[in-house]
Image: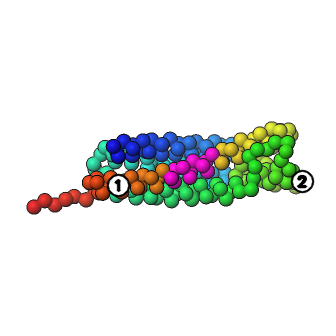
Amino acid sequence: MLSGVALGLRGFQLLFSIVILGLAATLISSQVYGDSPTTTRYSTFTGGFGIIVACVGAAGLFISAIPELIVLGLDALSGILFAAGGIAWAVGLRGISCSLNDHISREDWIKTLTNDLINQGTLKVNDGTWYGVQRGTDDADVVSDRLSSNCKKGLADEVFQFLCFVLAVGLIVLGYIRMRKGGKTGGSSYVA
């Protein structure tokens, strides 16, 4: 019973990690000026690490050579990394609106445009500052659509990071219960 629940949670962990990696990779590939932000690159790391942890954890359910304590340690580490990633996105997107419509104030629109996580980079030139979302267009609606899309991707990445954190905590609790009920710990038992 517990193995089935653990396998289901591992499936969600794998799926959510793939989503995190995909969203971050999409944001990185759309970067126009300069390097992608550290938060976005960190998300590719957490997504990739989450994929590895999900696969090792699922394999640990079937392969007795993988100690439960190793899997619990990986879950704990992934939980910390996912929480840090979610917090980084929350701080980076604080105070901006993903709904860039006619009712948003100019101040909020500029705050969103100048957010380095979603503006696809910044290029400073003599006559001002250009943002990656402006490349190839003078249409404010196109720029707003690009910003809104990037903002929603960043917000989704944040949510999935926190969901993976919750999954990691659940998997730790489940792993502890499995160990208490006679699961493997990785140590060998000496029988005289």
Q: Is residue 89 left or right of residue 75?
A: right
Q: Position of residue 97 (x, y in %)?
A: 75, 49
Label 1 crowd bin: few (<14), some (14–19), many (20+), radius 10 Å: few
Residue at (51% x, 59% y) in the render: 80
Residue at (48% x, 50% y) in the render: 167
**First-in-chain label (2 vs 1):** 2
Q: Is residue 168 left or right of residue 128?
A: left
Decide whether residue 28 is among the magenta residues: no
Going by the numbered disc 1, the residue's amino acid type is Ile
Q: How is the image coloured?
A: rainbow
Mark 2 vs mark 1, foreground winner is 1
Whether residue 85 is visible to the viewer of this picture, yes or no, is yes
Badge count: 2
Report the span colored magenta.
156-166
**Residue 85 found in image quarter:** bottom right
Q: Is residue 180 left or right of residue 82?
A: left
What residue is shown with label 2? 127
Residue at (85% x, 38% y) in the render: 139
What residue is shown with label 1? 177
In the displayed orientation, state which residue is furthest to the right: 127
| Inter-mark Cα distance, 2 to 1 | 63 Å
Q: Which quadrant does the N terminus fall into?
A: top left
In the displayed structure, 3 sits above or below 88; it is above
Q: Position of residue 53 (x, y in %)?
A: 43, 50
Q: Position of residue 91 (x, y in %)?
A: 67, 59
Whether residue 136 is visible to the viewer of this picture, yes or no, is no
Decide whether residue 158 is among the magenta residues: yes
The residue lying toward the viewer, choosing from 147 and 155, is 155
Going by the numbered disc 2, the residue's amino acid type is Asp
Q: Magenta stretch mostly in which secondary structure? A: helix
Q: Position of residue 171 (x, y in %)?
A: 42, 52
